[in-house]
Image: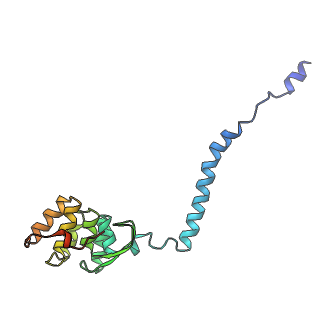
Amino acid sequence: MIADREERAPFVSPPPVWLVLAVALPALLGAICGVVWLLGAAAGFPRGADGRTLTLPEAAAIASHADVARLLRSGVDPNAPSRVRAGLVGNRERMMTPLEAATASIRTGPLQLLVEAGATIDDDNYPVLWCSAMARHNQDMIRLLESRHSRPSPIDCAAVRTLW
């Protein structure tokens, strides 16, 4: 009888199903997402998700100093309008100059880089930039604009095209 007691292992109940799922499910979902992401990256999807296809206005809109500097070093014209993807400045894709994109998204960080690289603030773009900065209450942009260009006669912002 004593020998029978020693041979039997104590009964251990398996963990509850909810505990197993709580531990295994996040790891399984993470692995699945990783595989899907790797397959998508190998297929080139999503196109434009890396800095190599970022336009100068997009870099200015997200205040990416490194991308602005890289694109300027590669010879991109700081005055040329280019594509800005939907969601960065507005709900739809649009064409903007880097100064317009930075102003519309209230990003004053890369403005000095753009101006030093030759981005011009002139009689044509000053009203658009100034009215956009006023609408967004962007005092840094207003100060920069006023330091780079003498303010012409009073600007009627209702008659100026908007950036968004």
Closer-to-camera residue (9/26): 26
- Residue farthest to the front, as pictured: 158
Q: Where is residue 149 in the image (x, y as percent from the top left)?
A: 10, 72
Q: Where is residue 30 in the image (x, y as percent from the top left)?
A: 58, 54
- Residue farthest to the right, as pictured: 1
Task: Identify the residue at image location x=17%, y=59%.
Answer: 139
Q: Where is residue 143 in the image (x, y as percent from the top left)?
A: 13, 62
Task: Identify the residue at image location x=56%, y=72%.
Answer: 42
Q: In the rendered view, does 55 fall on the left or right side of 114?
A: right
**Figure check: 101 above or below 76:** above
How many numbered badges does the structure rendering display?
Answer: 0
Q: Looking at the image, what colour scheme do you see?
A: rainbow
Q: Quadrant of residue 115?
A: bottom left
Assign the C terminus to one quadrant of the image. bottom left
Q: Position of residue 1 (x, y in %)?
A: 92, 18
Q: Quadrant of residue 148?
A: bottom left
Q: In which quarter of the image is residue 82?
A: bottom left
Task: Identify the residue at image location x=43%, y=69%.
Answer: 50
Q: In the rendered view, does 14 fall on the left or right side of 73?
A: right
Closer-to-camera residue (78/86): 86
Q: In the rendered view, does 157 fall on the left or right side of 29?
A: left
Closer-to-camera residue (131/140): 131
Closer-to-camera residue (27/155): 155
